[in-house]
Image (cartoon, coloured by chain):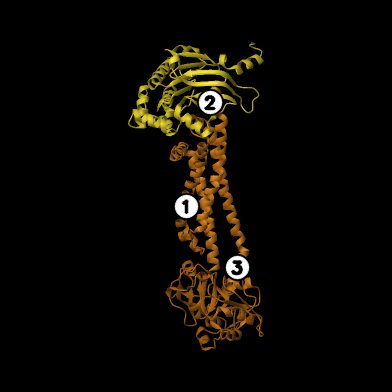
Chain colours: A orange, B yellow
Amino acid sequence: MNPLLLLRLTFKSILNRKFTSGLTLFSIGISVCLLLGVETIRKEAKHSFTNTVSSTDLLVGARSGSVQLLLYSVFRIGNATNNIGWDSYEKISSHPSVAWSIPISLGDSHRGFRVMGTSSEYFEHFRFANERALSFKQGRPFSAVYDAVVGADVAEELGYKLGDKLTLAHGVYDTDFARHNDKPFVLLGILERTGTPVDRTIHVSLQGIEALHTDWQSGTRSRDQVSAEQTLEMDLEPKQITAFMLGLNSKMEIFKIQRAINNYKKEPLLAVLPGVALGELWQLIGVAEKALLVIAVFVLLNSLVGLLTAILTSLNERRREIAILRSLGCRPSQIFILLASESLLFAVLGCVLGVLLFIFSVVLSQPLLQQYGLYISLASFGTEQVAFIVAVIAASFLMGSIPGYRAYKQSLSDGMSIKI
Amino acid sequence: MNAKTKQTLLRVNHLGFRWPTSQGDVIDIPELTILSGERVFIKGESGSGKTTLLSLLGGINLPSKGCIDIMGTDITQLKQSHRDRFRADHIGFIFQLFNLIPYLSVIENVTLACKFSALRSERALIKSASLEAEARRLLSHLQLTDLDKQVSDLSVGQQQRVAAARALIGAPELIIADEPTSALDADSREHFLQLLLRECAQSGSTVLFVSHDSSLEGIFDRSICLRDINRANLRDKAQQGGLTK
């Protein structure tokens, strides 16, 4: 007896029930696609989240919480509780163990996007993802006081091109009376997309930030305004910054320097390892992502139960068929295989359909997801996804053994007295 | 015909059967012998245990006691898988209704019997070049020409002829027919029976034909009334206060 015959019988039997089989297959396909999608987005979200900052050894700000420091300095969410004195920055960054440092000065905005004052070292040393450096889509880094470099999202959403003039606003709310109207910035460069908060940031020099605020005191414009040209004549060395990033010569020294900064006498500072802080933050927001996965697993379970129901329902209709096969010499064990292979076939075809749906939806939704900084590529289809598919097939084989066993039992007890 | 020159095909001894859930025996047959090539009519009303008897003879169910000897093999002593093999090789079944597998073509339905038995496949290939050709040959002998139709589109009479062809292909020694004509009208009933018996005679198969309809009795070599041989039946009737012995 050819085992392929059983498979052929199963296949033809499924084809005979085209409509219900199609629906069952579709439901499995959709839930497999959902599961793959959720798993991929989960992985990619975590990936792009933990990749917002890379190769920075220490993140330093005024003393607060490590998560808060990470939120405002890297994710540009919320505000710093306090600033750091420029002299502290100079002292720490000139330490012999420090290879490079990037100052960060926050507090201004432009039409909903945060403005970050920094130095040219930012373009040189800042890394994201796997040690990727920033690169320019157009233009070049700022050099003059009123130069600005914007992230990809800023340029895209506001429709900016090189040479455009930007009016920055004091604080994160862009209101008329808070605008630095008198000192417009010129757009000098547009960065390539990174999938990190850099895309939504406007970068200017520290001197630019300083120039904006020469005639500001305690958050309001002072009476005697200083023109843009006059400002350039003044000493624009910053007095305060918000935070800074440090790269060290040797990884071995991270903890030593961290301890030294945390014990800094002149002002209360906090140094954190970005990776550790990112991990803490992800633990907070990672719950949602786990909930998503649980839901996807339940949807899949639901469609497998649907498969079981469909097969068990068909089993009653097929008692006749089974009795005929028995009379032809088909063994009860072969009846079992006949029924069990049906759900296996459904699962395999359902998984194929699910993967195709997944590929299709990834291709379709890629541009949309990129706006959220998620880079879902088919390359991210990895061992987890394959493991899921194997699990689905194994689960449905287990489920298939239920109708298989019932048919086996029935075929023994029915004998030839066939229920119609 | 002289019965003594013929070999015994089937012998039943002290056969008893009861369903696991029921109290009394359904089958209690002390003795039944059928000779090779014989065409036997077994008459029994519905509920007289004829379907049960047939599934015992076919080795689908196992009797509670007694032996069933077919061509020198006591099938009650065989392992289940060997009994299934034995049935596939040596017995062809025709049921009352719905004999066919709906998702297979007419030809596939017929050749399916050979797929479960290498022996019948071999025998079929002696007669024709391929299983399909043998199926066509048998079907044309049974005067069925609409071979390209879906089986569900065939009339009941046509379906029964496809079932007969499936029982006959590969010339099994025993053909067991369980009321195959009861769904047919009187004319086609006789016609079907003649075609079936002619083919059985050609392949040398023994026929066990079970029916409640005694009008067909005359065509067969021998007629057995199930009530006469099955003692379980008598007891049953006696309990109901009908017959006493």
The local secondary structure at tag 1 comes to helix
Q: Amino acid at mark 1?
A: Val
Quick check: A304 left or right of A164? right
Q: Is residue A126 visible?
A: yes
Can you give x and y, in whole percent of width and height, for residue A43 in the image? Answer: 53, 61
| Spatial CA span between label 2 and label 3 | 69 Å
**Which part of the image, by quadrant, shows the N terminus of chain A?**
top left
Q: Which residue is mark 1?
A: A355
| Chain for disc number 1 | A
Task: Using the image, tell me which numbered label, if any, was put on residue B188.
Answer: none
Q: Pointer 1: residues within 10 angstroms few (<14), some, or many (20+)?
A: many
Q: Is residue B87 above or below residue A215?
A: above
Point out the residue furthest to the left here: B129
Q: Which residue is mark 3?
A: A279
Q: Quadrant of residue A113?
A: bottom right
Q: Pointer 3: residues within 10 angstroms few (<14), some, or many (20+)?
A: some
Quick check: A49 left or right of A13? right
The local secondary structure at tag 2 comes to helix
Q: Is residue B47 visible?
A: no
Query: Sequence order check: which comes first, mark 1 or mark 3?
Result: 3
| Chain for disc number 3 | A
Q: Is residue B78 above or below residue A115?
A: above
Task: Using the image, tell me which numbered label, if any, was put on residue B55.
Answer: 2
Quick check: A214 left or right of B94? right
| Spatial CA span between label 1 and label 2 | 47 Å
Q: Amino acid at mark 3?
A: Gly
Q: Is residue A375 above or below residue A245?
A: above
* Viewer-proximal residue among B241 and A290: B241
* Viewer-proximal residue among A276 and A206: A276
Q: Amino acid at mark 2?
A: Ser
